[in-house]
Amino acid sequence: MKLDVLAVSPHPDDVELHCGGLMVRFADLGYVTGIVDMSLGEKGTRGTVDDRRLEAAAAAKVLGLSERLNLELPDSRIGACESHRDALVDAIRRFQPDLLLVPHEVARHPDHGATARLARDAAFLAGLEKIETDHPAFRPRQLVFYLTHHRYQEPRPSFIVDISSSFNRKIEAVKAHRSQFHDPDSGEPETYISRPEFLDEVEAQSRYYGTLIGARYGEPFVVREYLSIDDPLAHFTGRAG
């Protein structure tokens, strides 16, 4: 199936956390959307591979996805060999997305930065005819980076999307990954994202980005190319030309 939008996720809950609101909005607008998960998250402290498969499927329904594929690359070792890049090249060719969403390389988790670099390269290489995979050459029209957890200087967003109408469903999709987040009845070790206050922090961050654009909730994104605007008045006011 050809997709309008494909989001690349290092682990099965990253897209939900960091651009889930936009993915819901895309589905609401009638676009055909999907996620490629790079790994099963098998090295994570909490949950099992079977848990995470079921949770990812449940979250996909909330997000309104048409496709969700897991490449089953080794968690904590994403990008360790050329075959990882080729697997993502083939997934991009298979789904032929016009827009590719990938994590920003400034990130707390090494897999996030590795996925960013891998996806940036794969998006370009997918268009080269002489690189052979199971699907014909195809290159997305636009690569967009979403921000993940980081402890460095914050990348400046190129644009922020109003997710006020989709925020509750974003959180519902996040909570579908039950094994990863706070559960007072769980006996598994606590992690950074399973702390009771973590989802409050997700909401606070979404509120912060929302305030920057006069909205209740927002999600930030980065593009590296200069953007071309044909009609600045229509762009900034929403008025038809």
Image (spheres, grey):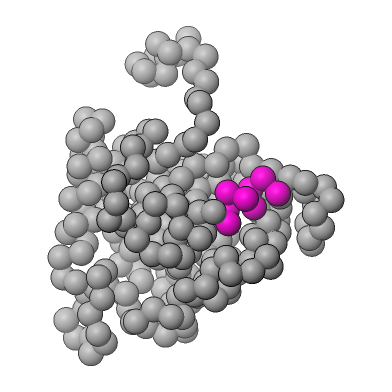
Please determine whether, in this image, residue 232 is positioned above or below residue 224.
Answer: above
The residue positioned 36% from the left and 18% from the top of the image is: 236
Coordinates of residue 105 in the picture (x, y in percent)? 44, 52
Image quarter of residue 202: bottom left
Q: Please state, as top left, top right, bottom left or bottom right, where the N terminus lies in the image.
A: bottom right
Q: Does residue 179 appear left or right of residue 145 in this picture? A: left
The residue positioned 52% from the left and 20% from the top of the image is: 228
Q: Does residue 113 appear left or right of residue 80 in this picture? A: left
Please determine whether, in this image, residue 23 is positioned above or below residue 171.
Answer: above
Q: Tell me if residue 60 is in the magenta stretch.
A: no
Residue placed furthest toward the bottom = 187
Please determine whether, in this image, residue 7 is positioned above or below residue 232.
Answer: below
Q: Report whether residue 97 is seen.
A: yes
Residue placed furthest toward the right = 130
Q: Does residue 217 appear left or right of residue 17 in this picture? A: left
Coordinates of residue 34 in the picture (x, y in percent)? 54, 55
Q: Report whether residue 19 is seen.
A: no
